[in-house]
Image: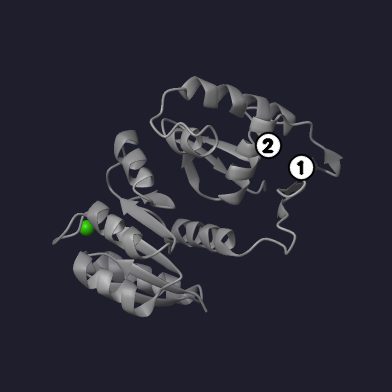
Amino acid sequence: VPLVAVVEDDPKVRAAVERALGASGYSVCSAATGLDGLSRIVDERPDVVVIDLGLPDIDGLELLKMVRAVSTVPVIVATARDNDEDIVRTLDAGADDYIVKPFSTAQLDARIRAVLRRTQPAGHDGTVVVGQLKVDPAARTATLDDQVLQLSRKEFDLLFHLVANQGRVVTKRELLAEVWQQPYGGGDKTVDVHLSWLRRKLGETAAEPRYLQTVRGVGVRFVEPD
Ligand code: CA
């Protein structure tokens, strides 16, 4: 049973989240402060961590950085700050995903399932399967509905990075750093253009996405289509 650690100072929200996650079959440990949360995360080694950004002792973003210094555990940040700048900063600080308060427990449950699915290892040959899409990093090939996709080197790298991080919002800055080796940013347009090419090859459009969901002002999320 996956263990979820919840760091949330509001007792009502904490109790509701504990109850809902318990009903969904998770084990839950929780903390009301950032420092208590940090020691629980270190001691109990949860499979997923949910951090509220507004904590009484330390800022949730600081807690996230402390967790990242010691662990690669998936972290979902719960935030009342619904603006692009804060969300981008949170993702760049190492959050795997974020959820805007107030959120439904069904939504939180879906995010947790997505990060858990992503942390499960790929097949032994490294091939990743998402819906009808198969991506083989060793052969550097991808097929959709058993048809080989004709991808440029960069398109393949972009697709593989997105697939390997499925369910998570990936920022353009991260794509520039990981796919183009430009950690200091610059070519947002480059990313946009390659995303639109990739989208066309996956047989979808920005208006009618299937695999590639645009998260406006933030980046893109690769998902399994319904
Ligand atoms: Ca709070």
Q: Could you tell whether 152 is left or right of 9 in the image?
A: right
Numbered circles on residues, count: 2
Q: CA distance from mark 2 to mark 1?
A: 8 Å
Where in the figure is residue 129, as x and y percent of width and height?
72, 53
* In this view, 65 is above or below 178: below
Q: Which three-letter amino acid code belongs to the residue tagged 2? A: Phe
Where in the figure is residue 205, as x and y percent of width and height?
65, 27
Task: Tell which residue pokes out farthest to the left in this image.
Answer: 57
Label 2 element class? helix
Q: Residues within 10 Å of mark 1 (few under 14, many from 20)?
A: many
Residue 142's label in the rendered image is 1
Whether residue 166 is visible to the viewer of this picture, yes or no, is no
* In this view, 36 is above or below 123: below
* In this view, 154 is above or below 30: above
Q: Could you tell whether 217 is left or right of 151 in the image?
A: left
Contact check, label 2 and label 1, Cβ < 8 Å = yes
Q: Could you tell whether 211 is left or right of 51 in the image?
A: right
Q: Could you tell whether 21 is left or right of 39 in the image?
A: right
Which residue was labeled with disc 2? 156
Q: Quadrant location of ligand 1?
A: bottom left
Residue 88's label in the rendered image is none
Label 1 element class? strand
Whether residue 165 is visible to the viewer of this picture, yes or no, is yes
* In this view, 23 is above or below 175: below
